[in-house]
Amino acid sequence: MIETKDLKIFKLFLCCLVFVMPIHAQEVLVPAGTPAYGEKQGFKSEQIGSIPDTLELPFFDDFSRTGPMPHAPFWIDEYVFINSSYTLNPVTIGVATMDAIDAEGNLNGTSSLPFESDFLTSAPINLDYPGRTDIYLSFFYEPMGLGDNPEDGDSLTVDFFASDSNRWETAWNFPGSANDTFKQVFIHISEERFLKKGFQFRFKNYASLPQTQFSPDQKGNVDHWHIDYVYLDTARSSNVTAINDVSMISPMPSLLKNYEAIPWQHFPKAYLTELKPALQIRYRNNDTTVRNVTRILKITDLAYQVSDSVNGGAVNVEPGIINEFNFPYNYPFIFYDADSTVFEMMSYLVTEDLDYKWNDTVIRYQKFFNYYAYDDGSAENGYGLRGEGTANALVAYQFSTFKKDTLRGVKMFFNRTLDDASQDYFRIGIWDHDKTSGSPGELIYASQPVQPLYEDKLNEFITFKINDTLLILSETYYVGWIKTTERILNVGFDRNTVNSDKIFYNLGQGWLNSSFSGSLMIRPIMGKALPSEPAPAGIENSQENLLKIYPNPASTYFFLDFPDVISPREWSVTLYDLQGKTVYKSRVDNAHQQHQISHLTNGLYILRLDQNGQIKASRKLMIAR
């Protein structure tokens, strides 16, 4: 790459500035930004429009259903965040997280004194059981987890609603603390004023902002509480704490060894070295007796609907122990020509009939779009450099591309703080790799000054396009930022994936590895010039509905049925076996052409339809004689 005059001047400017290690400079983590909502989820909404019908006992929710909103039939507000990323070892997969932000990701208060923050309010419940003394509400709670610890003045409370008096009363509370384990609570409900139809309970947390005038970036989404396994019923006792349930406790991992995502066009080169030989699931028997479960893994290409299942066998599970199982698999990947695609990876436990079924399953959508990612999309902290002498400090994040390609942009996630304190200009930097030191080498690109941006949607990445320089990269390189002030830039930091050995910072005397365990939320974008976020191949933009195959199953031939709007001579048809080998290919001469397949053996095949070399549709074809 030819170095521009501006880049030469800028590199000389950096060399003149970063020559003394500042005494007060420091690498810091700050409170988490807005929660990790999935793509296209939009806002946290505050209140459900209508109150559902009165529920009958038992009332149970362990928050293992797909979030990020609470399950609407059970809860009447949506302030909390349903997730599986803010805790390491929940009771079952999924928790409800209470924090310091409102529905749009803004702080609920601005004071260092405790203020009311989030609510989780049950729907009305029929508790018309006069004279009963065996009604208990139980739940598990954990302060902090992988988030920020609530201080002693903060608290988590449980309130009961007496329908006759139309009043909320505090039934339980606990002060803030730092902890990463769950504790179980039983609350006895025996007072007649609560034993009525229309009873409700709610969780409420009090949060407070740090007492600091010098680091406004600390005033972010602080004071996390996590709630799990909420259960209200009759015929209960506080002495019986066992849970008759075997459940998953961790999300489905990535298919990839080092990355959470890579471009689909790079996957064929990465297949042999980057693909994990096994996928790990984590589950626990919450009962007090040995239980037996069968473990299943299923992987599906959502573009072609090709699925492969693995039976992990039946096993006895000892009580109270976290179990890990590595699923070996041999999925028949087909490396078709597309900009992107998505695989659904699902693992589930076959458990006893009385177990709750929705916590037996974990699903991950493995995305192959146009970027590399180490992070899982959840920001448990913000990362940056702060203090005297860091005005020109550097942060560089190591990536290794499997295919020589053009860097088109950089996706970054920035944490929100009170009044958007982190609004200073910075430059995006790209460095080559110094093989001798194993750290960033020469600066090969520096952008014009840019500012952190925040989307209206929660936890959205911002894309900075690189269209002023042609950057063709191969092997190892670094993406990061160059500061312009001593305040922190506040980039999202994922605590669930650990890539600290790839995070480097330079305060003036050379490159150092990060001391924090996690991953930066920075994603280099490779490939074609950027219009917008690509759609998964075969899902949103597919024309599969335009294609019909008959007969299916087929014996010695098949036909393709096209609507009149399609010009058949522009099209070709290809058959692949489940190992990805091309076994039949033909131009489509007319809309009802007979395709001979008598030479093929019985089995399942993938039929792909192309128009002028572009994939337009796919179908499964079964050959059976």
Image (spheres, rainbow, N blue to C red):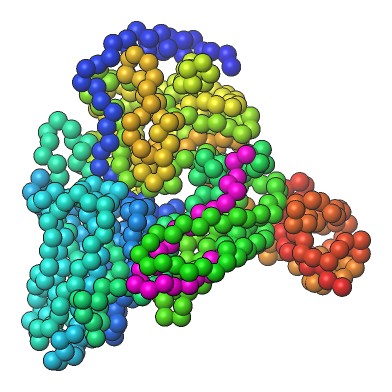
Identify which residue, 294 or 589, lies in the foreground. Answer: 294
Q: Is residue 383 above or below residue 352?
A: above
Residue 595, image quadrant = bottom right
308 in the magenta segment? no
Residue 248 appears in view: yes
- What percent of the width, then of the height, locates residue 180? 26, 52
- In the visual, does 536 lie left or right of 72? right
Residue 482, image quadrant = top left
Quarter of the figure with the N terminus: top right
- What percent of the width, then of the height, locates residue 131? 13, 91
Identify which residue, 320 or 357, lies in the foreground. Answer: 320
- What percent of the width, then of the height, locates residue 443? 47, 17
Residue at 29 percent of width and 65 percent of height? 228
What residue span does the magenta drawing correspond to? 273-296
Quarter of the figure with the C terminus: bottom right
- What percent of the width, then of the height, locates residue 549? 78, 68
Residue 69 appears in view: no
Q: Is residue 427 above or below residue 295?
A: above
- In the visual, does 567 lie left or right of 101? right
Residue 495, image quadrant = top left
Residue at 36 percent of width and 29 percent of height? 514
